[in-house]
Amino acid sequence: IIEIEGIHARGFCNVAMTNDVYALEPGQSQPTWILEPDGSPMSGGVLKRPGPDTTLFQLLIPKSAESRVSHWLRALSDGYVHMDEDDPFAKAPGPVVIRRLPHVLAEEWKSRPPDLASFGEEDSETGGAGWAFHKPYWIGQRARAKAPGGLAPVPAFAWEQPAESPTKQTVLYEIHKQAEAKMVPFAGWEMPVRYGSVQDEHLAVRQAAGLFDVSHMGLFEFSGENVHLFVNTLTSNDVSLLNVGQAQYSFLLDQDGNVVDDVYIYRLDKERYWMVVNAANNDKDWAWVNAVRRGEAMIDPERPWSRALGTETVVIRDMRDPTHGAETRVQLALQGPRSRDVLLAMLDDATSPDGAISPDGHA
C-alpha cells in the first residue's frame, strides 16, 4: 500500500491515475491504472479515500510493482521526471508525501488491483473498470485516443456576434456628464475619454492617483466544490497557486488553444473566484464558459468526448446582473502610486498595527 498525502493529493492522483479521483466519497475505493508516459501499463491498482479529508489517499498495488510505482510517484511529485511525451514542461499537482505502508495492511482490503493481463480489454461501452475516459487528462492518456461507444463527442463551440445594439451606459454616466467629460463609444458603451487636459490627467495618475470607471468590463463569479478545476480547464494559468486575496493574469482559451480573451482572476475565498473579462468580449465569454459547464462545447478536438472537471458543482454568476440584488457588483479602478493612501483614507478604521490590508479588504 502506498499512501499519498498533502493539500494537492487529490489533484496529483487524478493526473497520475486513470480513474475519477474526484468522484470518490469517504471510505470508497476505485480500480485504477498507473501508466508510463507512453501509455503502457506500469501497474494496476485500487485507490481508496480512507476518510473525509481530501488530502489523504491510499493506493493498493501488487507487491511486485511497489518499488517501481512508489519511486515513480515520488519523482513525479518532485517534478524530476517527464510525464508527457508531447510536453516536457508538464508537471503534476504537488508536491505530496509518498509513504509505503506495512504489507500486512493489504489483507484488510476487499478489492484487488486489476491484473496486467486485462490491460487493453476495456468494455466497448463504458471503457471498463479503472477508466474515466471523460477526464481531460491523465498520464499516458494520448495512447488511449479511442473512446468507448458510450461516450458521444461534444460539438465545437459556435458563436455568432449579435446585430449591433444601442450603445449602453454605465451607472456613472450622469456623473460623467455633470463633470463635463468627453464621451466616446467604446466596446458598445458610451465611456469618458477625458475631463480636461490629457497631460494633466496623465501626470495625476503617474504621480498621485486616478479613478477610472471600468464598470463596462465583465465580472464573472465561479464558486463551488473543486471550482479551481473548472477554472483551470478554461484558462492558461494555474489558479490553485493563488492564495485568498491574490490575483493573476491569464488567458481564456478555446478548444484549439486560441485566445478567446485575456482575463484577470481573483481568489476571494477557498472555493470562490472572480474573473474580469473585456467589455467587447463579455457576451462571447459568458456563452463559452457556460457551454463548457453544461458539457455542450468541445474542449479537446483530439478527445471530443472529454469534459471539464468540476462541472457538476460549479456555479457561475454574472455579477453585473441586477437580479442578484445587493450582491450585484461593478468595477472601479484606482490607479497610481498614491492609490493605496487614497483608499486607506476612505476606509473606516483604515490603519492596523502593521499597516497591512487583509485579503477581504479590511485593515
Image: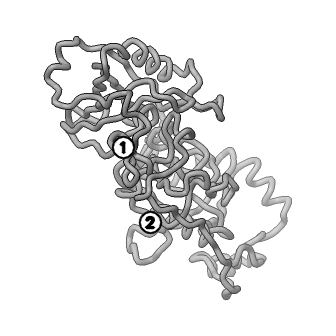
Q: Quickly name the residue at label 2.
A: 294
Give the x, y percent position of residue 37.
55, 29
Between marks 2 and 1 in the image, the one whose residue lies nearer the viewer: 1
Depth check: give the residue in front, 264 or 108.
Answer: 108
Q: Residue at x 70, y 85 (%)?
A: 164
* For residue 348, above or below residue 175: above
Q: Residue at 67% across / 52% down in the picture?
A: 257
Foreground residue among 196 and 220: 220
Tell which of 231 and 334 is nearer to you.
231
- Quarter of the image that includes the C terminus: top left
Query: What separation in Å lies between label 2 and label 1 (alpha carbons)?
Result: 19 Å
Tag 2, which secondary structure? loop
Q: Which residue is mark 1?
A: 20
Q: Quadrant of the N terminus?
A: top left
- Hey, what amino acid is under mark 1? Asp
Instruction: Give residue 273's position: percent from left, percent from top.
Output: 46, 52
The x and y percentages for residue 158 are 62, 71
Q: Position of residue 193 (x, y in %)?
A: 77, 70
Q: Which residue is at 54% across, 22% downward? A: 79
Is any atom of residue 89 visible in this view? yes
Q: From what the image shows, is residue 121 above or below residue 105?
A: below
> Can residue 361 be seen in the rendering of this structure?
no
- 233 horizontally vs 132: left or right: right
Q: On the rendered structure, is 41 left or right of 297?
A: left
User: In the image, what residue type sits under mark 2?
Assistant: Arg
